[in-house]
Image: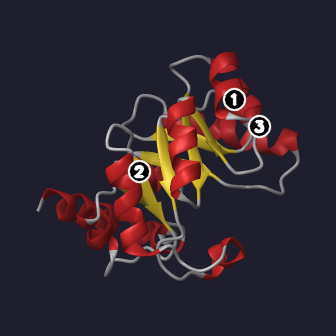
Amino acid sequence: MVQAAVAAEAPLFQIREKALPARILYELTTRAAEITRGSQTRLLVNDRSDIARAAGADGVHLTTHSLPVGVVRRIYGSEFLIGVSTHSLEAAREVAKAGADFVVFGPVFETESKRVYGAPQGLEKLRAVARELRDSPVVAIGGITIDNFEKCFAAGASGVAAIRLLNDVSEMASIVGEIKNGVQR
């Protein structure tokens, strides 16, 4: 998957292995960092800033249960990329103010993996977050498909994040290319 993301020139790749023991996550991240090093793809690790730093990843993706942005920024510095998941305008505003490099907002559309966070936020709420945080990139997440990603960009998102859409390595380059082309239209 990491090699396919690098070949496709995906801007970000997140290792989202929440249940792996720390040692195995570190080993996986170290190998992934070797693959992304020198490429256009930046590597993030879900929640584990310590493992991300130790393994040579570019940064961390924080959740609502992670260390606060300010703590992570103070420990790892300004070059360490920090993205944060949010599910409301208030939370997005708070993490942007705290120094997150980008805000992930959603779920925008219906998706099984994000049901735990409640009903989809929708495009209007995404638009409100993007308008409010005009100086901070907002990445839309949740139910992103090839048929709706352009709506996210039209609502002001700077990017989209997806699991299911990008999980076929044989299709990743064409899908990433289509998304990049859609943004340029």
**Which of the marked residues, 2 or 3, is nearer the chain's N terminus?**
3
Residue 49 in the image: state x and y as whole percent.
Answer: 71, 33
Label whose residue precedes the other's in the sequence (1 or 2): 1
Disc 2 residue type (three-letter): Val
Q: Is residue 60 left or right of residue 180?
A: right
In the picture provided, is 119 more to the left or to the right than 151? Answer: right
**Displayed quadrant of residue 53:** top right
Depth check, front residue: 104 or 12: 104
Q: Residue 58: tell me if it is visible.
A: no
Which residue has dot 3 on it?
26
Residue appearing at x 28%, y 72% in the figure: 151
Q: Amino acid at mark 1?
A: Ala
What is the CA distance from the residue labelled 2 to the residue labelled 3?
28 Å
Q: Position of residue 164 (x, y in %)?
A: 52, 74
Label 1 SS? helix
Whether residue 173 sits left or right of residue 119 in the image: it is left
Instruction: Say if mark 1 contacts mark 3, CB within 8 Å.
Output: yes
Q: Which residue is mark 1?
A: 55
Measure the C-alpha gap from mark 1 to mark 3.
6 Å
Q: Which residue is mark 2?
A: 138
Is label 2 in a helix, a strand or a loop?
strand
Numbered disc in front, either 2 or 3:
2
Q: Residues within 10 Å of mark 2 (few under 14, many from 20)?
A: many
Tell me the residue at 57%/81% (across/down): 111
Q: Amino acid at mark 3?
A: Tyr
* Badge nearest the viewer, 1 or 2: 2
Q: Residue furthest left?
A: 185
Render colour scheme:
secondary structure
At x 24%, y 58%, the residue is 180
Residue drawn at the location 71% of the way across and 35% of the way down: 68
